Image: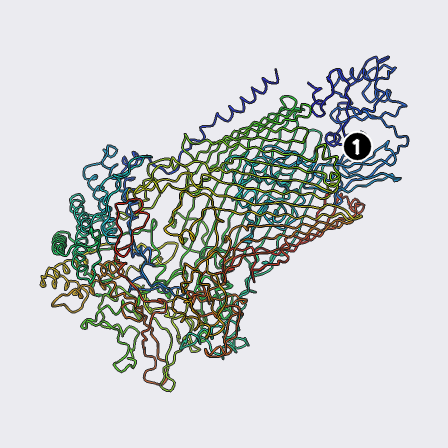
C-alpha cells in the first residue's frame, strides 16, 4: 500500500516492492509539490539496527524501505547504486546511515517531509553555498518557496522569513524558484553568494490551481472555460462590495453599477446570462452574501462560464462564481496583518441643475412664447435674482447644499499561520461608507472570517469556518418612497429661487416646492425620522475528509446559514412654516400628519449537506480522477412586516394600539437535492477529457416531474505537448497552446411565471379581500388550473476556447467563443384553441427558447525591465442575448411581424423615431412635407425635432418607429478592462481601466421634460436650447442651441416622443482603480519589528471618457436623478508583523 | 478487494445520507387551502366571498380616481397637462370569465357535500351572493361589450386532446344577456335576506332587484335610442343592439321593479339634515344612519382603505404629501341648476362682458342647487371646518385694461395679503396644485387622518342608492308616457335638493338630473351610451362647450381706494390641464373583442366598427 505513493506520483518502471526506482523527471517539479509539507518528526524517532556489510546500496535501500516509511528516489545518473557498503548500524537514525554511506562521495541526499529520500549525484567539482531571501512584489517575505538547483535534486524551502540557504551548488548553475500562485523564476548563479528573488504573482499561470466545481484543478488540465482572479487583484479597489472589485479585471463578466448609494453593489452577469450562482467555500449562496463578505478575505474567485458550471446543477445555468476564502499556511509562524485606509468620496458625476439666470430667463421666454398674459417673472426680477442681494431675491444653490464629500474608511486585521497539523486564518474588519449627501447616514459593515483546518491523523482531516457580518444601512426616514432618491430629487425639484428655511432660520423649514417633502432642509434625523436596516449574517461550515485508501477520499460538509434582517423605519410628521415679518412669528403653512412607523423582519435559514468521494489514480500516462457526490439544500425565508401610526414622533416603540398592518410572509421553504458525478481523464496531460452529470430534484415541481438529469462533457488538447510540436521552431515562442471544447446541458428551476406549488389546486388564502358586515375579511381565491406541464428550463452551453502562452510564458492569453441556447422557456400553446370564456388559459409549457452568444478573452504580458517588473493586461466580454425559437408566432400582417416579432432577433431592442435633425427656420417648418406632430406641424418651432418618415405616408406615427438602440437599463453587451501593474524597488503602481459599450440610455423626466412638474432641468440642457435673443419678445431673433426650446407644460409635444435624439448608445472607459504603493525597505521595517510596511494611495473612478453628457455613464435612470458611482481617493497603511 | 469494498461502502453511505432526506422535496405551502377545508369553515367561505366582492370594481371608482378624468366631470390637476382625447377600444372593458369561473367553482363547492354542515339559510345566502356577483359581472360585461356567452354554472376543464367544440359558446344577443341578468336577479332576490346590511356592503334582496331595474332601464333605452340613430349600432345577430319593439317591455320591468323596491325595501331618500347641501353629502358619503345607500364597496381601517381623500383633498387642509390630484371642472359645476333658474351657468360677467363683482368668494355660487355643495368643494365653502379659498391671483386695471398679479401658491405681498392661494388654481405644471378652481367633495372623507397615506380613508363607494331607483322609475314612467308618475318621482329628488319642481319630464331632464344627482358614481358614461348621446356631447370639436374642459379662476381685485378693491371676480377659461376635447366615436359605444378571443372561440362575432 505505502509504496503506491511513488507509483502514483511518478509512474513506476518496475515493481515497487523489490525494485529500485529509476526516475528521470524534472526534479524541481516534484519538489515543488513535495516541499510544501515541512520536514517530518518521523526521522527523529525511527532508528535502525542492521548489518549492511556486503550489501549493495540498492539492497540497503530495500531493507530500509521494508522497515520504515522511507522511500528512496534518485536519478538515473546515480551509478553507484550497486556498490556495496561495509558497515552495520545499531539504533542509528536515517541520517546517520546515509552520512556513512555517502561519506567521501559526490552523492548527496535530502529527506523530504513525507519521508521521501532523494538521492542525487553532485558531479560538479566546484560547489559552494548560496543564500538569499525571497519576497513578493510588495517586498513581503515569502515562506515555503521551493528553491532548487536546476536539473538536480538539490533544493530547499524558504523559512518563515523568506530566507534560504543552499549548499553544494555548482557554479554557473541555475536556481529555480517556484511557488503556487507565483510565476516560476530562474536565476543564474554567478560568483555571488547571495541571490535574492522577487516572485511575481501570476493569476493565470499554468502551474496555478483554480477552483472548479467540488474541487480544484490545475489550470493546465482545465477543459472548461473558467476565469480566475487572485487575492491581490481583487483587493485592488475602493469598492465596498465584492462585485465592484471584479469590474474590468476578468474576462467573461458583464458589469454595471446603476446606483452607487452607500452599500450598493455592482450588478454582474456572466456573459449576460442573468444572475449567476454564487458558491462560497463550496456552499451555494446568494448575491448578498457574495457581495458583503470582506473581499480582503478572499483568496481567489473563479468564474465558471460554460458547461463546467453544470456540476452545480439547478441554479447553474447562468454560470457560477466560485469563491475561496483565505486559509492559513502550515508550518509557518504566525503573522498579523493590519490594513487600514481612509478615503474621501464624491459623486462621480451628478448633473447640475440650471442656475438662477438660466432658469428665470428660460421661464420668461416660455411665458412669452405661450403668450401668458401674466408672466411669472419680469426682466426686472431676473436682474434682481442675478444680483442676489435684495431681500426676497437671494437664490439658493441646492446642489452645493445637498451634495458633499463624504468619508469612506476601512480597517482590517487578520492573523494566520499554522503548525504541522493545523492551520488557521482569522480576520475581523470594519467598513464605513458615508453617503455623499449632507448628514445622510451611510453603510457600515463589520465582518469576521475564521478558517481552520486540522489533521487529526494523517488520513483524517477536519476543518471549520465561520463567516459573519453585521451590515447596517441608515439614513433619515424621509416621507415617500426611496429616501436616498428623495434627497437627490430635491436638487431638481427645488428651484434656485426657493430657500430651505423661513426667514433663513434653520428651526423653521419652509415650503420649497409644491411637493412639500422635497425640502432638504428637513430631510434629516431630527425632523424626518430615521431608517435603519441591519443584516446579521452567519455562515458556519464544518467539513471532514478521510482518506480511505491512496487516492480515495471521502469528504463531508455541513453548512448552516442564518441571516436576519431587522429594518426599522420611522417617518415623522412635520410642519412647514412661513415667516410673518410684522409679528416676527412663524405660522404653520403645512402640517404633514402621516406618522409612519414600520418594521420589517426577515430571516434566512439554510442547511446544506454534502457528501463527496474523490478518487485519483495514474496508470502510466493515463490519469484518472473521479468524483461522486450528493448534496441537499433547504432554505427557509420567514418574515413579517408591521406598520403602526405612532401617536407622537418621540415614540419609537411599536404599539399594538396603533398597529394597523401585520403581514406574515410565511416560510417559503425551498428544498433541492442533487447527485453529482464527474470523471476526468487525461493522457499524459496532453489529451484531456471531462464528463460530468448531475441529477437534480427541486421542490418546485410536481412530485413525479421533479428530477432532471444534466450531463456535460468537455475535452482539451494541449497541442504544445505533442512531440511534433516540440520539433517546430514556433514552439520556442509559443510555449503552451491548448484547445478546449465543452458542451453541456444545464438546468434552471427558476422558471418565470411558475411558482412553487403551481401544480396544486385549492384556494389561495390572503389574496384580495373586502369589508363585509363592517369587518375586513382577508380574501381567498380559487387557484388557477394546476400546472403540470412545466418543468426545468434547459440550457445547452457550447464553449470553444484557446489558451496560450508565448515568449517564456511572458504573454498569456485565452479566447473563448460561447453559445448558450436555453430551451423550455415558458409559453402557452395558444393554437390549442380553448375559448377564453372557459375562464382559464392553457398553462405554460416549456416551449420557447433564447440564446446568448459572444466571445470573451484576455491577454496579459508579464516581464521586467531591469528592476522594473510590470504587467499589462486586457480583457473583454462580448455577450449578446437573442430571443430564439418562439412557439408558432403569428402576425396579423407583415408590419406587425416587423415590429413585434422577436423570433431569432437580438432581444430588448429599443425602438423609436429616427431624428434626422432640427428645423432651422419657420420657413423650413412651413415647407416640410411630413406632418411631424400630428397637428399639421402647427405646434412646431425652429429647433424642434425632425423625424424620418420611414414609411413615406407623410405623417409621423408609431409605424415610423425603427430600432434605435440596444437594451435599456441592463448590463452592457460589451465590457472590457485594461490593467497595468508596475513595480520598482518597493514602489508599485496599478491602474485598471474599465469600459463598456452596447447599451442604451434614454433621457427622460428632468433630463427631457421642460420644467418637469414645476421643477428644474439640468444646466447642460436648459443652458443649451434654442432661445430668443430677447426672452420677453416671442418674435425676436432665434439663437440656435442643441436642444429644442423649453416650454412649460409641453412634455407631450412631438419633440419629446421616443426618438434617438433622447437616447444614446452608451460608450465609456473609466479609470476605475489607481493604486500607488510604497514598501518600506525590509531593513527599516524589521527595525520596528515589522516584516512589511506599506503605504498606499488609491483612487477610484477618477475620470471617464464617454458619450453621455453630464451623467455617469453607468446609471440607468433616464432622469439622471440617481445616485451615481463614487469617486474615491484614499490613503492607506498595510503592516505585517 | 478491501479497497473496492470500501468504495462500495462509502458510496452507499453517501447515497443513503442523501436519499434519507429525499422526502425533503415534499414541502407544504404556507397559504394554500384544499377545497374541502374551505366549505367546512364559515370564515373561509366569507374569505372567498370577500375575494369576489373585492374584484367586482370596474369603471369610475374612488380607488382608481384617474378614471374620473375621461368624461366631463373632472380633470387631472397634477403636474403637467394630460393629453387624453379619444376613448380606447377597450376603455373600461369588462371581460372577466376568470371571475365567473371562480364563482362557479365556489357554487360547485357550496352545493357539494363539503358544505353539508351549513344551514339552509346559510346556503341560500352564499348561493345568492355568489350568483349576484356573477350577474353583476355579466351586467358590467354587457354594458361594455354587448351580448356575450353565458356559461351558466359550468366549471370547465381541459384535458390534452379533448374536443373543444362544446366549449365554444356563441355570444348571446344583447337583449338575451340583459334578460339573463334580470332572470337571475329575480331568482337571487328569493335567496337573499331582506334585511339591510352593515354599511350596505353585502348585497340583499333589494340589491338584486335594483340591479334588475337598472338592467331593464338600460335594455329599454338601448332598444329605443339605438334605433333612433341614423345608423344604429348593431350586429346582424343582435349581439349588439336590441329591437325597438322590446323597449316598452323593458321599461315596464324597470318601473315595476323600482316600484317594488319603493314599496317594500325600507330604503328612502336621506333627508335628516335641514342644511340641504350637507344633507346631500351625508346621503352619499356618511355611513351612519344612512337609509338611502343600497350597495357599496366598503372600506375599513385597518384592513383595506382608499387613498381617495389623501390624493384629492384640498391642498390647504391636506395631511400628507399628496392632494388635489383630480379636480372637478367648470362644466360639472354649471350642470347644477339654480334654485329658480334651470340655466346653471356661472355668472361671472354681465351681458356686456364686464365682471360681476362679488363680496365673498362663495357668493357667485349662491342659490345653486344644494347638491353642488354636497358634490364639489367650491371657493368659500368649508371642508373639515375650514374655509377653502381658491384664489388664482389678484387683478387690477391699468388704463382700463385688466392686469393680473400671480404668485407662487401661498404667496403674500409685503403687507401680508394673499396673492395666490395655497389652493390655487394655477396654470403651472406643479404637482399637487389645483388647476381648475374646485375640489371633489363627494366621497371625500371628513375623518381626521383619512387623508394620510399610512391610514387612508374608510369612505365607501356607492354602487346603488335609492335615488337611482327613483330616477329609474321617473325615466321608465316618462318613456311609458306616464307623465304624472314621472313628474312625481323626479320631483322627490328635486325637492330633496331644494330646487324648483318640474311639471313635465323630458329625456333631457332625466339626463341633467342623473348627471348632477349621480355625479362621480359611475353612471354618466353608461347613461350617455345607452341614450346614444355620448358621440354628440363628446364630439371631439375643439372649444365645443360639451367636449372641452373648463376651469374657473377666482381673483381678488387689488385696487386700493377703488370701490371694487377686495371684491372677487372670476375668469372662465379652458382647463389647460386637459389639452384636447373629449372625442367619443361611434365605435366607442361597444368595446372591441380581442382578436385572440375570436381565435380561440370561432363562434364569437366582432362588434360594430371593429
- Residue placed most toward the observer, B224 or B452: B224
**Colouring scheme, one of rainbow, by chain, secondary structure, one colour:** rainbow
Residue A899 shows up from this direction: yes
Above or below: residue A684 compared with residue A188: above
Mark 1 residue element: strand
Image quadrant of residue B392? Answer: bottom left
Chain of the residue that carries numbered disc 1 in the rendered image: A
Total marks shown come to 1
Q: Residue B453: percent from the left, percent from the top?
A: 39, 56
Q: Residue B35: percent from the left, percent from the top?
A: 30, 35
- Residue placed most toward the observer, B189 or A1105: A1105
Label 1 Cα crowd, 10 Å radius (few <14 / some 14-19 / many 20+): many
Above or below: residue B355 compared with residue A850: below
Q: Report which residue position mark 1 lands on.
A: A156
- Residue placed most toward the observer, B598 or B507: B598
A1055 left or right of A434 in image: left
Above or below: residue A746 compared with residue A971: above
Image quadrant of residue B330? Answer: bottom left
Residue A457 shows up from this direction: no
Q: Residue A741: percent from the left, percent from the top?
A: 60, 36
B289 left or right of A1098 in image: left
Residue at the farthest bottom position = B399
Rendered-image quadrant of the C terminus of chain B:
bottom left
Above or below: residue A383 compared with residue A862: below
Amino acid at each position: 500500500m505505502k509504496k503506491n505513493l511513488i507509483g502514483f506520483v511518478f509512474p513506476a518502471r518496475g515493481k515497487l516492492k523489490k525494485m529500485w526506482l529509476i526516475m528521470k523527471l524534472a526534479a524541481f517539479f516534484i519538489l515543488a509539490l513535495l516541499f510544501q509539507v515541512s520536514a517530518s518528526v518521523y526521522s527523529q524517532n525511527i532508528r535502525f539496527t542492521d548489518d549492511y556489510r556486503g550489501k549493495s546500496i540498492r539492497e540497503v535501500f530495500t531493507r530500509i524501505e521494508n522497515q520504515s516509511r522511507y522511500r528512496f528516489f534518485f536519478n538515473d545518473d546515480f551509478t553507484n547504486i550497486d556498490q556495496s557498503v561495509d558497515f552495520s548500524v545499531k539504533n542509528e537514525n536515517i541520517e546517520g546511515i546515509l552520512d556513512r554511506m555517502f561519506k567521501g562521495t559526490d552523492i548527496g541526499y535530502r529527506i523530504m517531509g513525507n519521508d521521501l529520500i532523494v538521492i542525487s549525484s553532485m558531479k560538479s567539482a566546484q560547489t559552494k553555498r548560496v543564500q538569499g531571501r525571497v519576497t513578493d512584489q510588495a517586498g513581503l517575505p515569502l515562506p515555503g518557496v521551493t528553491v532548487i538547483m536546476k536539473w538536480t535534486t538539490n533544493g530547499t524551502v524558504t523559512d518563515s522569513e523568506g530566507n534560504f540557504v543552499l549548499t553544494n551548488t555548482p557554479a554557473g548553475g541555475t536556481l529555480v524558484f517556484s511557488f503556487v500562485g507565483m510565476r516560476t523564476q530562474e536565476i543564474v548563479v554567478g560568483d555571488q553568494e547571495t541571490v535574492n528573488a522577487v516572485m511575481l504573482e501570476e493569476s493565470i499561470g499554468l502551474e496555478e490551481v483554480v477552483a472548479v466545481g467540488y474541487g480544484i484543478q490545475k489550470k493546465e488540465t482545465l477543459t472548461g472555460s473558467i476565469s480566475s482572479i487572485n487575492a491581490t487583484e481583487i483587493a485592488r479597489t475602493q469598492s465596498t462590495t465584492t462585485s465592484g472589485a471584479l469590474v474590468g479585471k476578468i474576462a467573461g463578466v458583464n458589469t454595471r453599477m446603476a446606483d452607487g448609494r452607500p452599500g450598493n453593489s455592482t450588478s454582474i452577469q456572466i456573459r449576460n446570462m442573468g444572475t449567476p450562482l454564487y458558491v462560497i467555500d463550496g456552499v451555494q449562496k446568494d448575491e448578498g452574501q457574495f457581495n458583503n463578505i470582506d473581499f480582503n478575505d478572499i483568496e481567489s474567485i473563479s468564474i465558471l462560464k460554460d458547461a463546467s458550471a453544470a456540476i452545480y446543477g439547478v441554479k447553474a445555468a447562468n454560470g457560477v462564481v466560485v469563491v475561496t476564502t483565505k486559509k492559513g499556511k502550515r508550518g509557518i509562524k504566525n503573522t498579523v496583518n493590519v490594513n487600514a485606509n481612509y478615503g474621501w468620496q464624491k459623486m462621480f458625476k451628478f448633473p447640475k441643475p440650471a442656475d438662477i439666470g438660466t432658469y428665470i430667463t428660460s421661464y420668461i421666454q416660455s411665458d412669452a412664447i405661450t403668450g401668458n398674459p401674466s408672466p411669472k417673472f419680469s426682466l426686472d426680477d431676473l436682474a434682481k435674482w442675478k444680483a442676489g442681494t435684495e431681500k426676497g431675491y437671494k437664490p439658493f444653490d441646492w446642489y452645493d447644499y445637498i451634495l458633499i464629500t463624504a468619508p469612506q474608511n476601512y480597517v482590517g486585521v487578520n492573523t494566520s499561520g499554522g503548525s504541522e497539523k493545523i492551520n488557521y486564518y482569522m480576520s475581523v474588519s470594519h467598513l464605513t461608507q458615508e453617503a455623499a449627501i449632507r448628514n445622510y447616514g451611510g453603510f457600515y459593515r463589520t465582518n469576521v472570517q475564521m478558517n481552520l483546518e486540522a489533521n487529526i491523523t494523517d488520513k483524517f482531516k477536519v476543518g471549520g469556518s465561520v463567516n459573519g457580518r453585521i451590515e447596517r444601512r441608515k439614513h433619515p426616514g424621509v416621507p415617500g418612497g426611496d429616501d436616498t432618491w428623495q434627497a437627490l430629487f430635491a436638487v431638481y425639484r427645488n428651484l434656485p429661487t426657493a430657500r430651505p428655511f423661513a426667514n433663513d432660520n434653520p428651526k423653521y423649514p419652509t415650503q420649497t416646492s409644491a411637493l412639500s417633502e422635497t425640502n432638504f432642509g428637513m430631510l434629516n434625523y431630527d425632523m424626518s425620522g430615521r431608517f435603519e436596516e441591519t443584516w446579521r449574517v452567519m455562515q458556519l461550515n464544518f467539513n471532514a475528509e478521510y482518506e480511505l485508501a491512496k487516492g480515495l477520499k471521502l469528504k463531508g460538509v455541513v453548512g448552516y446559514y442564518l441571516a436576519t434582517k431587522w429594518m426599522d423605519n420611522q417617518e415623522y410628521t412635520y410642519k412647514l412654516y412661513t415667516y410673518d415679518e410684522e409679528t416676527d412669528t412663524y405660522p404653520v403653512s403645512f402640517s404633514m400628519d402621516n406618522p409612519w412607523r414600520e418594521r420589517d423582519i426577515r430571516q434566512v435559514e439554510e442547511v446544506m449537506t454534502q457528501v463527496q468521494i474523490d478518487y485519483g489514480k495514474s496508470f502510466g500516462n493515463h490519469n484518472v480522477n473521479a468524483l461522486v457526490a450528493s448534496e441537499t439544500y433547504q432554505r427557509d425565508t420567514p418574515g413579517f412586516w408591521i406598520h403602526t401610526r405612532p401617536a407622537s414622533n418621540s415614540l419609537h416603540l411599536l404599539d399594538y394600539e396603533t398597529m394597523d398592518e401585520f403581514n406574515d410572509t410565511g416560510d417559503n421553504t425551498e428544498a433541492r437535492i442533487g447527485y453529482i458525478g464527474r470523471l476526468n481523464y487525461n493522457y499524459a496531460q496532453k489529451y484531456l477529457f471531462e464528463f460530468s452529470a448531475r441529477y437534480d430534484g427541486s421542490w418546485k415541481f410536481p412530485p413525479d416531474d421533479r428530477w432532471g438529469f444534466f450531463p456535460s462533457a468537455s475535452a482539451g488538447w494541449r497541442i504544445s505537448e505533442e512531440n511534433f510540436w516540440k520539433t517546430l521552431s514556433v514552439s520556442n515562442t509559443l510555449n503552451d497552446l491548448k484547445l478546449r471544447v465543452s458542451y453541456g446541458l444545464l438546468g434552471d428551476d427558476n422558471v418565470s411565471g411558475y411558482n412553487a406549488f403551481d401544480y396544486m389546486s385549492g384556494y389561495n388564502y390572503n389574496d384580495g379581500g373586502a369589508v363585509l358586515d363592517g369587518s375586513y375579511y382577508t380574501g381567498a381565491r380559487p387557484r388557477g388550473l394546476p400546472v403540470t406541464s412545466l418543468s426545468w428550463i434547459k440550457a445547452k452551453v457550447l464553449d470553444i476556447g484557446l489558451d496560450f502562452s508565448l515568449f517564456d510564458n511572458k504573454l498569456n492569453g485565452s479566447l473563448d467563443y460561447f453559445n448558450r441556447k436555453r430551451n423550455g422557456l415558458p409559453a402557452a400553446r395558444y393554437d390549442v384553441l380553448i375559448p377564453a370564456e372557459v375562464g382559464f388559459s392553457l398553462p405554460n409549457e416549456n416551449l420557447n427558447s433564447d440564446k446568448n452568444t459572444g466571445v470573451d478573452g484576455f491577454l496579459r504580458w508579464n516581464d521586467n525591465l531591469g528592476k522594473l517588473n510590470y504587467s499589462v493586461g486586457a480583457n473583454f466580454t462580448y455577450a449578446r442575448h437573442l430571443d430564439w425559437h418562439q412557439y408558432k408566432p403569428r402576425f396579423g400582417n407583415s408590419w406587425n411581424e416587423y415590429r413585434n416579432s422577436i423570433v431569432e432577433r437580438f432581444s430588448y431592442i429599443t425602438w423609436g423615431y429616427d431624428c434626422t435633425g432640427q428645423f432651422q427656420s419657420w420657413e423650413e417648418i412651413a415647407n416640410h412635407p411630413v406632418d411631424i406632430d400630428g397637428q399639421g406641424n402647427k405646434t412646431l418651432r425652429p429647433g424642434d425635432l425632425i423625424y424620418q418618415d420611414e414609411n413615406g405616408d407623410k405623417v409621423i406615427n408609431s409605424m415610423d418607429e425603427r430600432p434605435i438602440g440596444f437594451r435599456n437599463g441592463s448590463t452592457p453587451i460589451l465590457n472590457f478592462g485594461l490593467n497595468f501593474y508596475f513595480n520598482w524597488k518597493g514602489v508599485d503602481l496599478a491602474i485598471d481601466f474599465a469600459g463598456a459599450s452596447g447599451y442604451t440610455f434614454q433621457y427622460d423626466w428632468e433630463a427631457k421634460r421642460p420644467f418637469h412638474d414645476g421643477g428644474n432641468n439640468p444646466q447642460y440642457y436648459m443652458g443649451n436650447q434654442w432661445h430668443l435673443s430677447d426672452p420677453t419678445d416671442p418674435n425676436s431673433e432665434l439663437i440656435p442651441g442643441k436642444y429644442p426650446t423649453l416650454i412649460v407644460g409641453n412634455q407631450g409635444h412631438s419633440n419629446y416622443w421616443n426618438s434617438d435624439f433622447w437616447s444614446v448608445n452608451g460608450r465609456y472607459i473609466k479609470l476605475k482603480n489607481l493604486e500607488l504603493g510604497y514598501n518600506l525597505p525590509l531593513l527599516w521595517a524589521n527595525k520596528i519589528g515589522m516584516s512589511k510596511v506599506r503605504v498606499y494611495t488609491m483612487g477610484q473612478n477618477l475620470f471617464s471618457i464617454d458619450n453621455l453628457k453630464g451623467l455617469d455613464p453607468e446609471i440607468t435612470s433616464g432622469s439622471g436623478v440617481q445616485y451615481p458611482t463614487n469617486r474615491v481617493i484614499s490613503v492607506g497603511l498595510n503592516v505585517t508583523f | 478487494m478491501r479497497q473496492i469494498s470500501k468504495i462500495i461502502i462509502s458510496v452507499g453511505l453517501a447515497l443513503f445520507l442523501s436519499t434519507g432526506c429525499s422526502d425533503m422535496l415534499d414541502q407544504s405551502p404556507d397559504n394554500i387551502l384544499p377545497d374541502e377545508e374551505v366549505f367546512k369553515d364559515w370564515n373561509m367561505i366569507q374569505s372567498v366571498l370577500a375575494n369576489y366582492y373585492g374584484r367586482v370594481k370596474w369603471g369610475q371608482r374612488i380607488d382608481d380616481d384617474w378614471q374620473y378624468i375621461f368624461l366631463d366631470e373632472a380633470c387631472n390637476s397634477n403636474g403637467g397637462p394630460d393629453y387624453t382625447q379619444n376613448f380606447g377600444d377597450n376603455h373600461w372593458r369588462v371581460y372577466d370569465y376568470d371571475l365567473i369561473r371562480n364563482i362557479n367553482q365556489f357554487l360547485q363547492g357550496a352545493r357539494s357535500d363539503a358544505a353539508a354542515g351549513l344551514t339552509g339559510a346559510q346556503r341560500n345566502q352564499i348561493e345568492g351572493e355568489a350568483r349576484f356577483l356573477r350577474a353583476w359581472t355579466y351586467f358590467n360585461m354587457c354594458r361594455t361589450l354587448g351580448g356575450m356567452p353565458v356559461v351558466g354554472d359550468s366549471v370547465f376543464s381541459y384535458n390534452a386532446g379533448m374536443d373543444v367544440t362544446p366549449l365554444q359558446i356563441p355570444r348571446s344577443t344583447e337583449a338575451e344577456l340583459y334578460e339573463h341578468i334580470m332572470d337571475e336577479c329575480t331568482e337571487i332576490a328569493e335567496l337573499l335576506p331582506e334585511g339591510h346590511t352593515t354599511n350596505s356592503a353585502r348585497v340583499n334582496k333589494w340589491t338584486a332587484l335594483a340591479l334588475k331595474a337598472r338592467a331593464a332601464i338600460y335594455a329599454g333605452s338601448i332598444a329605443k335610442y339605438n334605433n333612433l340613430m341614423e345608423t344604429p349600432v348593431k350586429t346582424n345577430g343582435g349581439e349588439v343592439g336590441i329591437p325597438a319593439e322590446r323597449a316598452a317591455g323593458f321599461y315596464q320591468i324597470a318601473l315595476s321593479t323600482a316600484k317594488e323596491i319603493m314599496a317594500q325595501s325600507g330604503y328612502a331618500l336621506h333627508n335628516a339634515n335641514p342644511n340641504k347641501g350637507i344633507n346631500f353629502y351625508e346621503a352619499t358619503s356618511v355611513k351612519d344612519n344612512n337609509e338611502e345607500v343600497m350597495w357599496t364597496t366598503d372600506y375599513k381601517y385597518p384592513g383595506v382603505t382608499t387613498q381617495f381623500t389623501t390624493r384629492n383633498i384640498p391642498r390647504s387642509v391636506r395631511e400628507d404629501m399628496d392632494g388635489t390630484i383630480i379636480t372637478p371642472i367648470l362644466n360639472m359645476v354649471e350642470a347644477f341648476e339654480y334654485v329658480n333658474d334651470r340655466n346653471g351657468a356661472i355668472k361671472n360677467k354681465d351681458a356686456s362682458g364686464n365682471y360681476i363683482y362679488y363680496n365673498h368668494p362663495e357668493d357667485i355660487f349662491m342659490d345653486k342647487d344644494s347638491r353642488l355643495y354636497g358634490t364639489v368643494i367650491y371657493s368659500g365653502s368649508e371642508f373639515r371646518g375650514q374655509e377653502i379659498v381658491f384664489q388664482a391671483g389678484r387683478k387690477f386695471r391699468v388704463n382700463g385694461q385688466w392686469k393680473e398679479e400671480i404668485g407662487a401658491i401661498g404667496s403674500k405681498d409685503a403687507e401680508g395679503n394673499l396673492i395666490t392661494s395655497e389652493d390655487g388654481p394655477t396654470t403651472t405644471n406643479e404637482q399637487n396644485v389645483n388647476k381648475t378652481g374646485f375640489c371633489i367633495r363627494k366621497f371625500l372623507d371628513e375623518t381626521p387622518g383619512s387623508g394620510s397615506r399610512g391610514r387612508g380613508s374608510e369612505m365607501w363607494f356607492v354602487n346603488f342608492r335609492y335615488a337611482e331607483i327613483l330616477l329609474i322609475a321617473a325615466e321608465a314612467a316618462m318613456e311609458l308616457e306616464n307623465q304624472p308618475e314621472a313628474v312625481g318621482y323626479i320631483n322627490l329628488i328635486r325637492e330633496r335638493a331644494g330646487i324648483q319642481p318640474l311639471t313635465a319630464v323630458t329625456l333631457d331632464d332625466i339626463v341633467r338630473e342623473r348627471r348632477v344627482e349621480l355625479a362621480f358614481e359611475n353612471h354618466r358614461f353608461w347613461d350617455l351610451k345607452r341614450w346614444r348621446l355620448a358621440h354628440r356631447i363628446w364630439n371631439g370639436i375643439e372649444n365645443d362647450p360639451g367636449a372641452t374642459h373648463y376651469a374657473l379662476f377666482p381673483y381678488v381685485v387689488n385696487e386700493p381706494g377703488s370701490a371694487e378693491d377686495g371684491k372677487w371676480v372670476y375668469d372662465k377659461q379652458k382647463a389647460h390641464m386637459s389639452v384636447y376635447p373629449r372625442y367619443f366615436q361611434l365605435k366607442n359605444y361597444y368595446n372591441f373583442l380581442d382578436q385572440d378571443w375570436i381565435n380561440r372561440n370561432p363562434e364569437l362575432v366582432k362588434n360594430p366598427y371593429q
